[in-house]
Amino acid sequence: MTTNLLTPKQTAETLGVTIGTLAVWRCTGRYPLPFVKIGRRVMYKFSDIEAYINAHVFQNTLHEVSL
């Protein structure tokens, strides 16, 4: 099984947010971005990041785009 795991830094760069923002999202559950805990280390699956991005595609502020 091959899983592409990204660090919080890589994930933050991909999403255009700060590492601190990702930490807030993890703690508050504000956005449904799954993460993996390996000991104290936090990682993100690339496929989950892609799914998160695809779930937040809009044509305008009123309508989501179904992919």
Image (cartoon, helix red, strand yellow):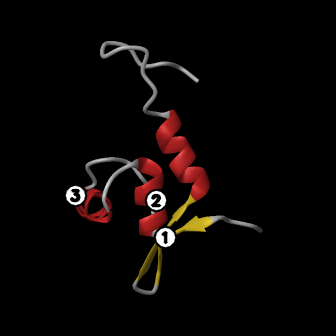
Dividing the image into 4 quarters, which one contains the C terminus? top right
Q: Eyeballing the image, is 11 above or below 37?
A: above
Residue furthest bottom as drawn:
39
- Callout 2 secondary element: helix
Residue contact between numbered discs 1 and 2, judged by CB atoms under 8 Å: yes
Q: Residue 24 location, x and y as percent?
A: 23, 60
Q: Eyeballing the image, is 48 above or below 44?
A: above
- Looking at the rendered structure, which numbered label has been put on residue 11? 2
The residue that label 1 is drawn on is 7
Amino acid at circle 3: Thr
**CA gap, disc 3 to disc 1?**
19 Å
**CA gap, disc 1 to disc 2?**
6 Å
Residue displayed at 42% across by 67% down = 8
- Looking at the rendered structure, which numbered label has been put on residue 28? 3
Does 66 sit left or right of 13 as displayed?
right
Residue displayed at 33% across by 52% down = 17
**Residue 50: quadrant of the picture:** top right
Amino acid at circle 2: Thr
Q: Please indicate, yes or no, whether residue 34 appears anywhere in the rendered image.
A: no
Q: Residue 21 location, x and y as percent?
A: 26, 58
